[in-house]
Amino acid sequence: MLDICLLGTGGMMPLPYRWLTSMMARCDGSSLLIDCGEGTQVALRKKGWSPKPVDLICFTHYHADHISGLPGFLLTMGNAERTEPLLMIGPKGLERVVSALRTIAPELPFPIRFLELTEAREQHRIGPYVIDAYRVNHNVVCYGYAISIPRTGKFDAERAKAQQIPLKLWNSLQKGQTITDGGRTYTPDMVLGKPRRGLKVTYCTDTRPVPVIAEYAEGADLMICEGMYGEPEKIGKAREHKHMTMYEAATLAKRANPGELWLTHYSPSLNRPDDYMDEVKKIFPAAKAARDGWSVQLDFAED
Ligand SMILES: [Zn+2]
Ligand SMILES: [Zn+2]
């Protein structure tokens, strides 16, 4: 099971009715946050989700609307008595940027580790998550993320019995672990069928519509993507500042065909994103103008 919440949907600055864009995922007791602009912890409090189990924070890039909420967020995690290490992932410069912000949050009861992205595409397995980071096209280095929960094949008890695999090892093998017991090594492929479809969510903001975004959104249950402008005439502005319009996001979704597209990172000048959705849905019918706090619980499909 994977819980997703789009905590805010704003770009550039928080508004009284719209927090800055960030996303939280929860799976197996481990939470993951993408971006942490000013007010992210308020949005999280409003949702009623806890900052304490956040094991991982991923940053798309270091513009203030995506990271300036970090010091306060870390202090709140500390006040919740977190002691387990926290991992951060982001473009090159991550440790320098976070260290600068930490001058106002120097004492925390948990250690912070850093994973700086240097390649155009990187994949990391962290806790229950498989994280794909892919470089996009903004006016500073910026990455999109695909968060996946893989699913192993179905456990075949008959095969396990036929191979005389001890019952006590079945559970671990089912979880995909390799075990050595009594001088014999047991691998998951001895008892599992072929991998089944897992869960996948992509999050991408502050970029021109480059093909890699659609590539990673293929087969996703949910694609969360920037739709900064709804007014068609603002395409020039989108090009100039390296953002995208709702129509460009929908065109990427049309190519990728995710289960749903949620638009986010609206310009503060965009008061009513819904006004443009009739046109957007003509391009991709499963497009939605997301609002702050929208969440979804994704479950593995029946076999
Ligand atoms: Zn932004
Ligand atoms: Zn930006």
Image: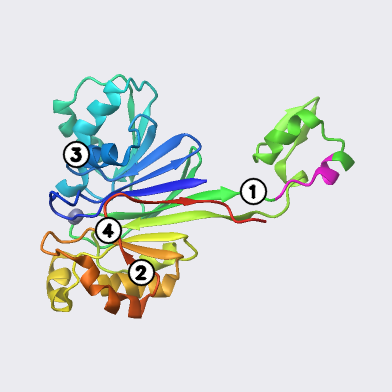
Query: Percent position (x, y) of residue 210?
Result: 31, 69
Query: Percent position (x, y) of residue 7?
Result: 29, 47
Which residues, given as a range, are shown in magenta?
A: 154-160
Residue 63 visible here: no
Query: Percent position (x, y) of residue 166?
Result: 82, 31
> Which quadrant does ligand 2 occupy?
bottom left
Marks 2/1: CA–CA distance: 30 Å
* Residue at 43% over, 66% down: 215
Marks 2,4: beta carbons within 8 A? no
Q: Is residue 10 or residue 273 the one in the foreground?
A: 273
Looking at the rendered structure, the secondary structure element under dot 2 is strand
Residue tagged by mark 4? Answer: 205
Marks 3,4: beta carbons within 8 A? no
Residue 1 horizontal side relative to residue 176, left or right = left
Q: How many residues crowd around disc 1 within 10 Å: few (fewer than 14), some, or many (20 or more)?
A: some
Residue tagged by mark 3? Answer: 69
Q: How many residues crowd around disc 3 within 10 Å: few (fewer than 14), some, or many (20 or more)?
A: many
Mark 2 vs 1, N-terminal side: 1
Residue tagged by mark 2? Answer: 287
Looking at the rendered structure, the secondary structure element under dot 1 is loop
Residue tagged by mark 1? Answer: 152
Where is 212 relative to 1, above or below?
below
Where is 142 relative to 274, above or below?
above
Label 2 vs label 4, nearer the camera? 2
